Image (cartoon, rainbow, N blue to C red):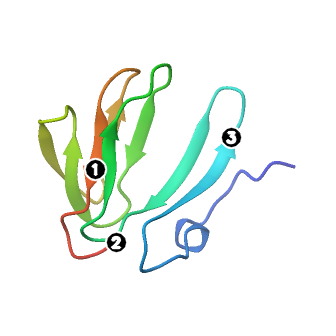
Amino acid sequence: MLKRIFNIPETVPEKGRTYRAPLYDCRNHEIHLWRVIPGEWIYPHIHPRTDDIWYLVQGNGVYYTTANETHAVASGDLMLASPEEVHGIFNSGAED
């Protein structure tokens, strides 16, 4: 049976480095969990055919909605990007 319940802190245990854990991959969706350490990036990029939905579990940062437009984000924020929309994040805070 495909795993459908995840404990976030246990899923990405790699403290001290930026890390990506693929959680779920099927015909219509992919879900990845990221840990981004202070001073690191998920560089601004696009996906030609898929949406990206990001939920910030902990910390704060700067979210890119274009190559030059940013918005401050913090724990609890939900960020959305449709196909062809730029999205990325820089961890400007002190915690992962």
Residue at (30, 63) in percent of width and height: 40
**Which mark is first along the chain, 2 or 3?**
3
Task: Kindly state the secondary structure of the residue where label 3 is placed.
Answer: strand
In the image, residue 41 lies at what x, y percent? Answer: 31, 56
Q: Which is more toward the observer, 29 or 78?
A: 29
Amino acid bearing label 3: Asp
Residue at (44, 27) in percent of width and height: 47
Image-based side of 22 in relation to 69, left or right: right
Amino acid bearing label 1: Ile
Instruction: Using the numbered discs, state the Cα–Cα distance from disc 3 to disc 1 in whole angstroms.
Output: 22 Å
Q: Do the CB atoms of the residues marked 3 and 2 lie less than 8 Å apart?
A: no
Image-based side of 34 in relation to 38, left or right: right
Which of the labelled discs sits on residue 89, or is there none?
1
Q: In this view, does 40 lie above or below 70?
A: below
Q: Do the CB atoms of the residues marked 1 and 2 lie less than 8 Å apart?
A: no
Give neighbour class at mark 1: few <14, some 14-19, many 20+ (Cα, 10 Å): many
Q: Do the CB atoms of the residues marked 3 and 1 lie less than 8 Å apart?
A: no
Give neighbour class at mark 2: few <14, some 14-19, many 20+ (Cα, 10 Å): many
Task: Decide if residue 12 is in sight here.
Answer: yes
Give the quadrant of residue 7: bottom right
Which of the labelled discs sits on residue 96, or is there none?
2
In the image, residue 26 lies at what x, y percent? Answer: 72, 34
Amino acid bearing label 2: Asp
**Which mark is first along the chain, 1 or 3?**
3
In the image, residue 20 lies at what x, y percent? Answer: 52, 59
Residue at (22, 76) in percent of width and height: 94
Which quadrant holds the C terminus? bottom left
Q: Which is more toward the observer, 12 or 75?
A: 12
